[in-house]
Image (cartoon, rainbow, N blue to C red):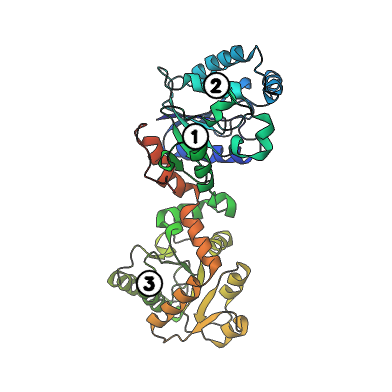
Amino acid sequence: MKIALLHYSAPPVVGGVESVLAHQANLMAEAGHTVRVIAARGDAWDGHIDFIRIPLVGSRHPAIQAVKVELDNGRVPPGFDELVREIMVQLQTATRGVDVLIAHNVCSLNKNLALTEALHRLNGSPNFPRLILWHHDLAWTTPRYRNELHHGFPWSLLRTDWPGVAQVVISSLRQSELAALLGIPLKRIRVIPNGMDIARFFKLETKTLEWIRHLNLLAATPFLLVPVRITPRKNLEMALRILADLKQKCPAAAMVVTGPLGAHNPANQDYLSRLLNLRAQLGLEKSAHFLAELSDSYLPDAIIADFYRLADALLLPSREEGFGIPLIESALSHRPVFCTDLPPLRALGLDDVSYFSPDEDPHQVAGLIADTLNNDPVYRFATRTRQQYTWEQIYQEKIAPLLAEDPHQFPDEGGSQ
């Protein structure tokens, strides 16, 4: 599919809408679409995304600013129609061959009403793309814009239900506001929130990102980190049994053991084989992960730190520990700790971690983990955010279906949340 995204400006211009546009363009290009960005200011930031500069679609062009001064005072200047027609010609050229045009904020704000009217006239015309109006802000419901808005054309464009377009807003509040403004049902307006780029926010290593995608770790709730070598004294069979019981309460729970085989005992390979057999018996092949299966090389500290940032909790079921550096790493990562009650670990954790016996019933430990995490508002908010507000999830669950849908098909009642 050929997709164009339109806004007054684009990166490297800094702004909230500019950032959203860039994330969407990147995701669409990664999904195999041919993507172009149309803006007055900005530049190409990716070799897979074309940038088309049209000065008249911006908010700072002298001609646009001169017209806006008149419009803000309730007067439609004589040159308005000519400006509209000039923008129409340039938009037709810029969108030639495009299937879908996503217009960000330019049909809900009054910063360039000539552009808004140009899109209004082109909408539905032969060879013009299917139009998606993506609203971040609404001038008519925002007090600071009210003195610039007047009855009649062209200000009415911002409160008119355009035929055949898909209406998208970023929140339920905007959905309610736009529905009232346009006089249409909520179901006509799709809610697609803004998101976070987890890889950029956490500065994840390339290999970390590859693994979390391969193992689908962002969908894990909770994601337990077991940062130890694979050796019998680490009691990893207990970790597997804890996970199996935890999944009875938290079906999406997952676990990652980051360490390699213990370096000094050839029997550790047999231990790994026993663990893999136990994993299969417990039905945990898709939720208990040993990074030693994916890499036999040493994992640098940067990757281990990545996993601490992504995990929900540390699980350390060891039978023996001389010190317990994972507890220190967890503390600095602000992650709760569930570990065996060994003297070195208690000396570090004091009363600030959750302890259990290395011979405890795994069902009891699973209950401890589930109850502790589910009663923690930070955990609940973090997992909800990871599931609903990462750009990859938003693209897969909301944007991709929008691009593929029948233009005459409306979302379900209440909009897409």
240 lies above or below 178: below
Counting the numbered discs, the total is 3
Identified by mark 1, the residue type is Leu
Counting other residues with Cα less than 10 Å from the Cα at mark 2, is it few (<14), some (14-19), or many (20 or more)?
Answer: many
Per the model, the C-alpha gap separating discs 2 and 1 is 17 Å
Which residue has dot 2 on it? Answer: 117
- Of residue 400 and residue 166, the one placed in the foreground of this image is 166
Whether residue 323 is visible here, answered yes or no, is: yes
- Camera-nearest label, 3 or 2: 2
Q: Earlier in the sequence, mark 2 or mark 1?
A: 2
* Amino acid at circle 2: Glu
Residue for point 69% across, 26% down: 72
Position of residue 198 measured from the top left corner of the image (x, y, whole percent): 54, 52
Q: Amino acid at mark 3?
A: Lys
Q: Nearer the viewer, residue 51 or 136?
A: 136
Q: Are marks 3 and 2 in contact (CB under 8 Å)?
A: no
Q: Earlier in the sequence, mark 3 or mark 2?
A: 2
Q: Is residue 47 visible?
A: no
On the rendered structure, is 350 left or right of 215? right
Badge 1, how many Cα within 10 Å: few under 14, some, many 20+?
few
Residue 84 location in percent, x, y? 58, 16
Q: Which residue is mark 1?
A: 182
Q: Left or right: 110 with respect to 270? A: right
